[in-house]
Amino acid sequence: LALPGPVGAQGVSATWDTSKDIASLIEQAERLNPLLEQLTPQQWEAKGAPATYTTQWRLARNEVGYLIGAAQALRKQPEKLTLALETLFRLQSVEAQVNSLVDGVRRYQNPAVGELLVSVVGANATNRDQLRQYVSDLAQTKEQEFRIVDQEAQRCRGSLVQAPARPAAPKPAPAK
């Protein structure tokens, strides 16, 4: 993922490159939904699994939806740092939730499904790393923009302070 911006900016890619990377992230995240739907944590409880697996399963399903929504918003507005951060945090949350479920899947349902979950989450590792770099680059670019704006504002303030005082404009004569 790369920050879209003016031609010649440092390490900045075109919007279509960023959009393509975000689309890949969304596609990988969507692959988790059918796998999570296969899971039956309520039935695991009958086999001695803690009820927390059911809660983790619900959270994981919700987080995948939130991730997809955040990534779609970022795809529409790739210059927004807040959307980039939200997408990164949602992606990390999905990884944590799914990884916490994997032990239960392996033990109480099907080890092969657990391995499949791990591989799908792992397939998004490249997207996660690209997103992390994008967030870093975007933040750096925003800081540079702020520094330039701040310097220009300081220059303008300085020129106003140093400007010679102008004589007051004559007051209009009273109307007769």
Image (cartoon, rainbow, N blue to C red):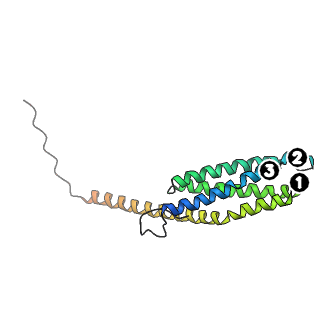
Q: Is the C-beta separation of discs 1 and 2 under 8 Å?
A: yes
User: Where does the image place residue 68, in percent across and percent down from the top left?
Assistant: 63, 51
Q: Residue at x 73, y 49 (%)?
A: 61
- The residue to which callout 2 is attached is 43
What distance separates the C-alpha of mark 3 from that of mark 1?
13 Å
Q: Residue at x 49, y 57 (%)?
A: 79
Instruction: Report whether 119 appears left or right of 145.
Output: right
Q: Amino acid at mark 3?
A: Gln
Q: Position of residue 72 (x, y in %)?
A: 58, 52
Quarter of the image where one finds residue 26: bottom right
Q: Is residue 64 left or right of residue 104?
A: left
Q: Which mark is residue 38?
A: 3
Dot 3 falls on a residue whose secondary structure is helix
**Residue 155 percent location from the top left of the image:** 33, 61
Precedes in sequence: disc 3 or disc 1: 3
Say which label, 2 or 3, has the lower sequence index.
3
